[in-house]
Amino acid sequence: MQLAGKTALITGGARGMGRVTALELARLGARVVIVDWEGEAGTRTRDEINRLTGRQAAEFVYCDLSSLAEVQALASHVQARYPALHILVCNAGITDPVRRLSADGWELHVATCHLAHFLLTHLLLDLLKKSAPARIVSISSDAHKAGPGLDFDDLNNEKIWKGSPFSNGASFAAYHRAKLCNVYFTLELAERLKGSGVTVNAVSPGYFVNTTIYRNLTGIVKWGSWFVFGIGSLLRLNTPEKGARTHIHVASSPDIDGVTGKYFAYCKEALPSPLALDPVIRKRIWAWTAQVTGVGE
Ligand SMILES: NC(=O)c1ccc[n+]([C@@H]2O[C@H](COP(=O)([O-])OP(=O)(O)OC[C@H]3O[C@@H](n4cnc5c(N)ncnc54)[C@H](OP(=O)(O)O)[C@@H]3O)[C@@H](O)[C@H]2O)c1
């Protein structure tokens, strides 16, 4: 029970790799806080974890992370209820070919994958520091490598959808940008947190992990991904359990005590895109995000 006495919060913990991560961290002894906007799946996962661990190891908290106000309410709940937080797994993510806006007017990929986790992490930083050694795990994707990088004239992803409110290509471009932001955030935050006892690392879970994240894709892309999922599932190559191994490793392994500012894939340190290593862009996107969220200046 390597994590006995530890508390972990997992966003997007109701389903997919977040669910597997919550279950495994609880099995290792942690108390887990599952955050998601899927109420039924969230309570099911909570009950499953409590049944399998034989203790009240899990709590489910409903939150639409794309809303900055709901993230603030979530942070207040966590601060009031938990005296310590040792592991924060920023896992929730989406892919959606329809351009949708959050309650604050931000396109949903940038709102959910980037702004929500930037804000949540900052609001919980004092608690994490007080609980040190503590870990922040930012779930990115190798999709951060598959594109041209950020467009500072289009941070709300309007241009990439221009002409069509429905596009798999635009969804992929928005996802690429959001996952690149996760790596910029990790590298910049790791520098800022040096000496605090709080580490922060980014994770790539692999490719086409068989979860429901791709369910909104359409046409040939949908059939193509189903084909890849089908083959992968037959061979048991891309299960959420396999995909979540790196989440769990980076969140809990004693092998990486003190390791910070790294990108992990397949449970090993890996190189992020050269784009992500540009400190000027990294600081520029940090400054923009701090302005939007009102934290991190
Ligand atoms: N699957 C892959 O192949 C793959 C590859 C590389 C990286 N990743 C990354 O790994 C992470 C986990 O992905 P997954 O495949 O396990 O996804 P998943 O099965 O879709 O699980 C993500 C969970 O987050 C929830 N969520 C989405 N938006 C939310 C919001 N605004 N507020 C609260 N909860 C929200 C989802 O609800 P809904 O289902 O209702 O949206 C879902 O329950 C993501 O960051 C993803 O980008 C996945």
Image (cartoon, grey):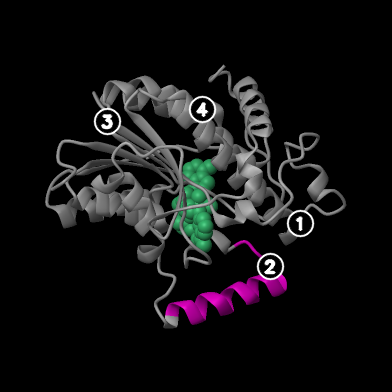
Which circle's residue, 1 or 4, is located before the other in the chain? 4
Indicate the amino acid at tag 4: Leu
Local packing at callout 4 (Cα closer than 10 Å; few below 14, some 14-19, many 20+) is many
- Position of residue 227 relative to residue 190, above or below, is below
Indicate the amino acid at tag 1: Phe
Instruction: Kindly identify which numbered label has been placed on residue 166.
Output: 1
Marks 1,2: beta carbons within 8 A? yes
Out of 158 and 41, give the one closest to the viewer. 158
Q: Tell me if residue 209 can be seen.
A: yes
Which circle's residue, 1 or 3, is located before the other in the chain? 3
Give the residue at x 52% y 35%: 187
Marks 4,3: beta carbons within 8 A? no
Local packing at callout 3 (Cα closer than 10 Å; few below 14, some 14-19, many 20+) is some
Secondary structure beneath disc 2? loop
Marks 4,2: beta carbons within 8 A? no
Which circle's residue, 4 or 3, is located before the other in the chain? 4
What whole-number distance in Å separates the C-alpha atoms at marks 1 and 4?
28 Å
Indicate the amino acid at tag 2: Thr
Q: Quadrant of residue 258?
A: top left
The x and y percentages for residue 21 are 33, 52
Eye-nearest disc, 1 or 4: 4
Residue hosting label 4: 119
Give the residue at x 82% y 44%: 159
Q: Quadrant of the C terminus?
A: top right
Local packing at callout 2 (Cα closer than 10 Å; few below 14, some 14-19, many 20+) is some
The x and y percentages for residue 62 are 41, 39
Main secondary structure along the magenta-highlighted residues: helix
Residue hosting label 3: 133
What whole-number distance in Å separates the C-alpha atoms at marks 4 and 2?
32 Å
Residue hosting label 2: 218
Q: Which residues are magenta?
A: 216-233
Which circle's residue, 2 or 3, is located before the other in the chain? 3
